[in-house]
Amino acid sequence: MDRDLAAIAQGVPEFRLLARADLDTCSRGENNWKTRDPFRSRCQMRVAVAYTFAGELAPRAMALHAVLSGRGWNGRGIPLVLDEYWDAALDQPRYRSGPPETQYQQGTPTPPSSQTLTDIPRVLHIAFFSGDDPDRYTRGFTASMARIQDVQAQGFRFLEYYRTFSGTPYAAPWLAVRQPGTRLVVLMFSENYVRN
């Protein structure tokens, strides 16, 4: 993920880093009469990185797409969002139901019937915000991101035995600097791994 972030910093220099939060969690594998997992623990690392920028969204978004494609991230992602949900003339979403969101994957998914935990590809979820967006769009646009936002106030989730959090969730810093003409892009990387 750090290499991806370094490539983004070089490929989209208009992005200014606002905040980064890392959440690493593990739960124990099952080992009983019914299920025997081939690993001791199943874990997930989530990294949420927020950038601010000014100016038109489309050229910066396409620059981000070019960086991600060059790093092996797959998906129509940003071009699809711009084609279907973005009004280029007004430089704003066509619909006001929420922020433009999209997703990329890295790796080749295997069929669910033969899939193991480590076969699940790395996932990158992206959302764009404007300084004019209501607070509710910024505070938690997906359940996964809300989990990172609220992790410091939560106890361990069901079956979790390990949870470590570092960094700063993006919402408070964004609300402090948000103003008309500024934009926010939030990237959440998610990667599964096992411990034996």
Image (tube, rainbow, N blue to C red):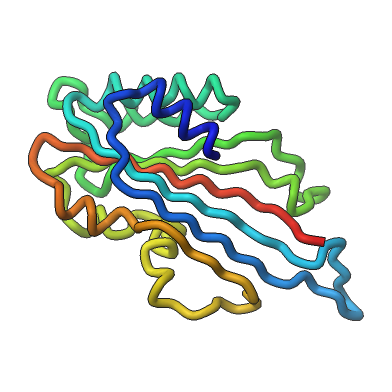
Residue sitting at the far left: 180
Left or right of residue 90, residue 16 in this image: right
Q: Position of residue 122 (x, y in %)?
A: 61, 42
Q: How many marks?
A: 0
Q: In which quarter of the image is the N terminus?
A: top right
Q: Is residue 18 above or below residue 172?
A: above
Is residue 172 something one can see in this rendering? Answer: yes
Left or right of residue 177, residue 151 in this image: right
Give the camera-side residue of 181 and 18. 18
In the image, what residue occupies the spot 18% across and 57% down?
135
Q: Is residue 181 above or below residue 35?
A: above
Residue sitting at the far right: 33
Q: Where is residue 181 in the image (x, y as percent from the top left)?
A: 11, 34
Q: Where is residue 72 in the image (x, y as percent from the top left)?
A: 60, 26
Which quadrant of the view contains residue 83?
Answer: top left
Give the camera-side residue of 68 and 13. 13
Q: Position of residue 73 (x, y in %)?
A: 56, 29
In the image, what residue occupies the spot 41% across and 22% down?
10
Is residue 79 something one can see in this rendering? Answer: no
Which quadrant of the view contains residue 49?
Answer: top left
Q: In this view, does 98 lie above or below 160?
A: above
Left or right of residue 160, residue 134 in this image: left
In the image, what residue occupies the spot 77% across and 70% down?
29
In the image, what residue occupies the spot 20% across and 45% down?
96
Q: Quadrant of the C terminus?
A: bottom right
Which quadrant of the view contains residue 107?
Answer: top right
